[in-house]
Image: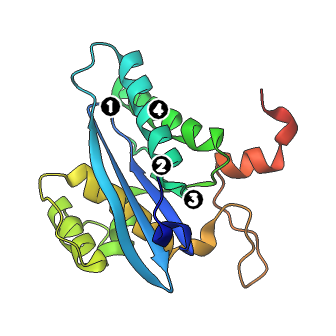
Amino acid sequence: MASTSVIASEKIILGVDPGTQVAGYGIIQVQNGQMKMLQYGVVHLSKYSTHELKLKKLYDTILRLIDEYLPDEMAIEDPFFGKNVQAMLKLGRAQGVSMAAALSRGIPIVEYSPRTVKQSVTGNGNASKEQVSHMVSHLLNADLDPEFFDATDALAIAICHYFHENSIPGVKKSGGKKDKKGGWGAFVGENPGRLV
């Protein structure tokens, strides 16, 4: 059930830090240029016995958050490239089900690299999780649980998106050039006949 202040907001952004053991989410409201945290938390997936159950739990949680908070946009962290191919595949699937939840509700999605998120929030692309959490707490003027680094990372992703709000796929920038950042939201918007 949304409150009046949520309905009157200019924009609500859902940030997602996908994971296969713990996934983080953070929702911010932007009103009159001011950011306010609406919700943040983590989804503990390690207790589920199969990868399929983990993906279902993540999908269901993201869908529940979308239906409850009605975000205008979703920002998600790009998977980073690692040496463990299996871990990368699983992380990509976690990102995919999170994106599928947003797509099922017609919500535009933008992806950001971990370095871009850190740079946007702290000014340092190599910032630690502690530094990101501290700066997120400062920017949102909120006391955040330092144990929830995945959740504060998700809030950082949402904040990064707000700082880069002109980078929504397909939106023309001031120079007239189309934004290079692609994404599933842009693909769906440009190819409505290709949906199954």
Query: Closer to the camera: disc 2 or disc 4?
Result: 2
Mark number, residue 73: 3
Real-space Cα distance between discs 4 and 1? 12 Å
Query: Closer to the camera: disc 2 or disc 1?
Result: 2
**Which of marks 3 and 2 precedes in the sequence?**
2
Relative vertical location of residue 161 with respect to residue 2 in this rendering, above or below: below
Real-space Cα distance between discs 2 and 4? 14 Å
Badge 4 marks a residue whose secondary structure is helix
Per the image, the residue denoted by label 2 is: 68
> Residue visible at 66% across and 54% down?
182
Per the image, the residue denoted by label 1 is: 20
Is 37 situated left or right of 191 in this image? left
- What's the coloring here? rainbow
Is 93 situated left or right of 84 in this image? right
Per the image, the residue denoted by label 4 is: 59
- Amino acid tagged 1: Thr
Relative vertical location of residue 192 with respect to residue 45 in this rendering, above or below: below
Real-space Cα distance between discs 2 and 3? 14 Å
Query: Closer to the camera: disc 4 or disc 1?
Result: 4
